[in-house]
Image: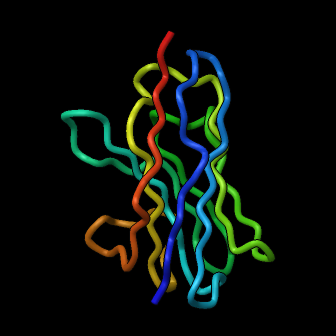
Amino acid sequence: QVQLVESGGRLVQPGDSLTLSCVISGRTFEDYGTSWFRQAPGKEREFVSGISWYAGSTEYSDLVKGRFAISRDNAKTTVFLQMNNLKPEDTGVYYCAAAYRGGRRLQQTGVDYWGEGTPVTVSS
């Protein structure tokens, strides 16, 4: 069984930076592609960014491209989401998701494991 635990979400001001972490345990970390999704109040959950298994190629939503960066530390079995120049529209609960041998953009229907989410609020 794979477990995903997110952390790092909090209240920040517009223009601030924040790094989210997702610790993955229970299986071989390198065998899993990982994506971040977010869900704003009253809206559907949407893809934010992803990193593929093995090669580590990355992909970003057009809404965050140029501001967010995804990375992973195999030794720490952790995936990070560095978020810069945050905007109020980035507010939401951020979820980490993993799929066995998943690509750089997981489809929600193809996710094997979800984390519980970490809330991010961007407000002045």
Q: How many marks?
A: 0
Q: Nearer the viewer, residue 118 or 74?
A: 118
User: Residue at point 28% right, 48% down?
Assistant: 45
Residue 65 spot, x, y in % from top left = 56, 37
**In the image, what residue occupies the spot 46% across and 28% down?**
121
Q: Residue furthest left?
A: 42
Residue nearer the viewer, 89 or 53 = 89
Establish if 45 lies above or below 2. Answer: above
Residue 123 in the image: above or below residue 95: above
Residue 106: % across, % down: 41, 66
Q: Is residue 86 left or right of residue 100?
A: right
User: Picture quarter containing residue 83?
Assistant: top right
Q: Quadrant of the N terminus?
A: bottom left
Instruction: Name which residue lies at 25% across and 33% down.
Output: 41
* Depicted 29 relative to depicted 21: above or below: below
What is the basis of the colouring in this image? rainbow
Residue at the image position 51 percent from the left and 52 percent from the top:
49
Q: Is residue 59 above or below residue 108?
A: above
User: For the view shown, which residue lies furthest in the top direction?
Assistant: 124
Percent across and percent down for residue 55 are 68, 75
Q: Give the side of residue 118 with respect to residue 85, left or right.
A: left
Position in image of residue 118 (x %, y %): 47, 48
Res 12 → quadrant: top right
